[in-house]
Structures are given as C-alpha cells and as structure tokens.
Amino acid sequence: MIYLYSVFSFSGLVILLSAGLMIAERFLVNYGICKLDINAGERPLEVKGGQTLLSCLYANEIFIPSACGGKGSCGHCKITVISGGGPVLPTETPFLSRKEIRSGVRLACQVKVREDIYVRIPEDFLNVRLFSSTVTSTRGLTYDIKEVRVKLNDPPEISQRPGQYVQIQAPSPEGPVFRAYSISSAVYEYNEVEVVVRLIPGGVGSTYVHNLQVNDEVTFTGPYGEFHLNEDPSVEIVCVGGGAGMAPMKNIIYSLYDRWPDRSCWLFFGCRTTKDIFYLEQFKELEKKHHNFHVIYALSDKLEPDEKWDGETGFIHLSVDKHLEQGVPRQAFLCGPPLMIEAVTRVLEEKGLQPEDIFYDEF
C-alpha cells in the first residue's frame, strides 16, 4: 500500500510539474515575433513565437492535413523543416521513418516556433483553400453508409484531381476538429462536392456527417491527396475498393470517362453481404455506355438462404487475380482496409505493376 501511495504521489508530482512548465512557457516566456520562411522566400511570414507551427500555418490560411486537430496522434501534418525547429520529439518518432528524420521531416503540430524557422511545404498544400458550403442532398446508400452533397459558397468553385480528399470541420467537446473524406464527385463538378461516409460508432466526424440535413452549412478544407491519374489513354486503370473506399473510385471513373470515353478501366468492389452493395446498378449503366469499362462486385461472406446474388464470391483480390491479364500497362488505385490493400497489391505486382504505379489509401 505504501509503495502504491508513493507511485501515485510521484506520478501526480510529475503531472503537476509538467502542467506548471507548460503554463509558465505560455504566460511567462516571450519569444517575440519570429520569421516563418516558406519555400526559400516564396511565402515569408511574421508570426508570434510560442505557438505550434501547425497553428501558425492555419492562422495564415495554409492548411496542412491534420485529422487529429494537432494532438500528434494522426501523423498527417508532415512538412520539411530546414532549420529552427529544434530536435525531433519523442511524440514525432512513431510517425517518421529514419529517412524522413534525416531529411528534416517533422510533424507541424509538434514543432514550437521559438525562433526564426525555415520550412519547405509541397505546392499542393499552398493551393489548399478553406471552403464554406451548403448541403443540397443526403442519401442513405446502405445501413451505415451515407452520401452527402454540398454546394460551394465561398469560394464558389474547387479544382481537384481524381482521387483527392477534403477535410470536413466537425464540432467536438474539445472544439472543432477536421476529418478526412475522399471526394466522390467527378472533377468536372466544379461547384459541388460529394462525399461517401461510413458511420463509425462514436466517431466525431462520421456522426456529424450522418446527421447533416439539407441547407446545413458545412466548412471544409481541400483538396488534398497524392493520387495522380496517368494521362496516357493507352494505360489501363484498375480501381479496387471496399465499403466507403468507393468514394475515390467513383470520382476517378466518372472523371476518366468524361475525358476518355474509350479508355480501359476495371472496377473491383468488395462487399461482405448483399446489404453492403451500393452504386452497382449505376455502374452497370455506365458499363453499357463504355465498352472498355468492366464492373466486378464480389461478396466475401457466406450467402444467407434468403439472399439472391448471381455475381462473384470470395475476397476481392481473388477477382482481381482472376480477371486481369499479365503484362498489360496499368495504373491502380486502391482504397479500403489494410489487409485488402496488402492482398491486392501482391496480386497487382504479380501481374507486372511497379510500386510507383499503385496508389492506395488505407482506412
């Protein structure tokens, strides 16, 4: 009992000291105005010292991806700090590879601006905007997946690449947070953005999106994402998804056939049961219009006696292996759970795809 009392006392003392140091730094230490230099003078800023780098960037409308609200738990806010960022913190190392650490990559939410700081930020991030929008429609696609479409107010248009995502601002007990959702609307829909969101029990972002009603106001930033569609129409496109991983696939496919009506494309979509199927009829109609578009849905769970299904069964990577020929020039886009991504990637590499031709988004 005495031992436990000592441990609790020591832990309490450490917590109090840590809190005291944080309060002291916030109110007693004055770092003054610091220079924040972005991309070697491309965007010079003056910011108040003592804030996190992420906060400074957001205050100047430079929106770096951050799904956790700056708590250091998502690892998305990576930028390169040339100098002035101090040593890499233990809170950062779980999210950084050795190569990234050697290259100066840091988590912007964990770097404090205490002196002049020089950073390098990808040009895509400098083009990200803050959008205000209004919900125009909501639609339940399955028992736990909802489609929400918004009309853009300010700015009134968005420029995106196929497969990119936005970060929707959602309320939480600790203040506004941002959550990432892929854009399901095509690139030619400049005035609207559509997302397909699965409800996660207790999820702040998905609960907010699922409760949106027509005429509600929605704030988001974007577009983000590293998907780059090959511009060569002779390169076949392979899209593989599962669940809410349909969103970027829908975007890519409709954008693709708006520009290249005869381009070859495969859509493989994995569902557990018939209750998880959505957009199938819509894609079958598109398949009739474009003879080089192929749609394959597969169910992984055993069929119930009352379920009617004449399509494929088994895990979706088996369908990919069954239908794709060896050695065809291809580019692939995958979105779904890690195990699916891993299995499909193995199949695609066996078919001759190089790692740089496979883009994926795990969730």
Image: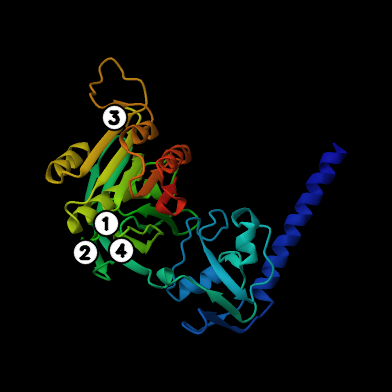
Residue drawn at x 61%, y 67% is 103
Mark 4 or mark 3, which is nearer to you? Answer: 4
Between the C-alphas of marks 1 and 3, the distance is 29 Å
The earlier-in-sequence mark between 1 and 4 is 4
Look at the image and tell me whether residue 195 can be seen.
no
Between the C-alphas of marks 1 and 2, the distance is 17 Å
Between the C-alphas of marks 1 and 4, the distance is 23 Å
Q: Determine whether label 1 and label 4 are within 8 Å by CB.
A: no
Between the C-alphas of marks 4 and 3, the distance is 32 Å
Q: Which residue is mark 4?
A: 160
**Residue 297's quadrant in the figure?**
top left
Numbered badge on residue 275: 3
The earlier-in-sequence mark between 3 and 2 is 2
The earlier-in-sequence mark between 4 and 3 is 4
The earlier-in-sequence mark between 1 and 3 is 1
Amino acid carrying mark 1 in the image: Asp
Q: For this rendering, which residue is in front, 47 or 307?
A: 307
